Image: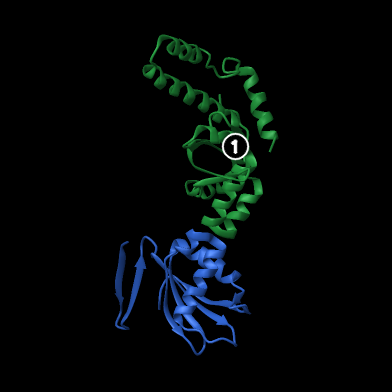
Amino acid sequence: MVPHILSFARYLLCEVNVSDMNDLFLLNDQAVAAAVKAAVARIHGDYGAALCSIRFQVKYLNAHTGIVFLRFPKSCYKLLWSALPFITHINSRGQKIPCFLNCLHVGGTIRTCQKFLIRYNTQQLHRMLPKCKNEGEKQQIRQAILGCFIPGGNKEACEDDIECEEDEGE
Amino acid sequence: MTSVREKIGSSGFHRTVLKNGSPYCYMKVCLLDQETRLNAVELKSLIITGLKDLHGEVGAALPFDVLKFDEGSLTAVLRVCSGGLVKLWSSLTLQGYYQSQACAFRVLQVSRFNL
């Protein structure tokens, strides 16, 4: 079922890769937004900085897994996307955190990105399963895999409502 | 790129038809600045500075050439690949200063052919 709602944004689902996992807890969305804006301004100059100031937003940041949702205007998301590999560090709370962004998915709505993220995380759990050393860890991961579900995935009726809410938010 | 050349009559003119579009664009620009004297190298560096300000490092890496520069009238012929024409033109338009002196570029002619 494809909802016929015009979306003027593109959501980039990115993963922040750091060498030390504890650094992730220092991140906040302003720091990530500032790093993206600085990279775009360096790579694409004043023109890119202007595009980045229109409808760019960091929608979501998960400090535990390092997942970031970036919203870009649909008309120029490719140009802004091209600057993301040039981010090498994020300045947060007076500290310079060396990191890089890995783009996992590009979606038109937050919901498609969420669906992808749940599927991606399930895959990651499946990859972790053979590496487990003892039975207790295996049991924990099996429980986690069974716990993965897409919220509202079987309730098709309410799907449209959620989609509308997301688009109205822009 | 394929091109078709045919000779027309006895006049000696050639008609050149480019089927896939030409790879380059040529611009004839004039620098409006009475005060300073600059040579071709300084002109190119001025244009690259403008490109870097407006389009960042991607703009500064844009391949373009100063084919001809007349230091007397400050008129230059630039060659740029077709994809970069808009970037080059916009940065020329927004170029306002050379060594903290007001200056401006006037684009006299833009063509696909360097005739």
In the rendered image, which residue does mark 1 sit on?
A26
Residue shown at the point (46%, 37%) measured from the top left? A19
Secondary structure category for the residue under label 1: helix
| In the foreground, A146 or A27 | A27
Residue shown at the point (60%, 34%) measured from the top left? A61
Q: Is residue B56 above or below residue B76?
A: above
Q: How many numbered marks does the figure carry?
A: 1
> Which quadrant of the rendered structure holds the N terminus of chain B?
bottom left
Neighbours of disc 1 within 10 Å: few (<14), some (14-19), many (20+): some
Q: Residue A70 in the image: state x and y as whole percent.
A: 58, 39
Residue type at mark 1 is: Leu
> Which quadrant of the rendered structure holds the C terminus of chain B?
bottom left
| In the foreground, A114 or B67 | A114
Residue shown at the point (54%, 36%) measured from the top left? A23
Q: Residue A151 in the image: state x and y as whole percent.
A: 59, 19
Left/right placement of residue A140 relative to residue A108 reads left
Residue B25 position by quadrant: bottom left
Q: Residue A100 in the image: state x and y as whole percent.
A: 48, 42
Q: Is residue B39 visible?
A: yes
Residue shown at the point (58%, 58%) measured from the top left? A47
Q: Residue B75 in the image: state x and y as whole percent.
A: 50, 83
Q: Colour of chain A?
A: green
Q: Is residue B79 above or below residue A89?
A: below
Residue A113 position by quadrant: top right
Callout 1: chain: A
Residue B67 position by quadrant: bottom left
**What is the letter of the blue chain?**
B
Q: Is residue A107 visible?
A: no
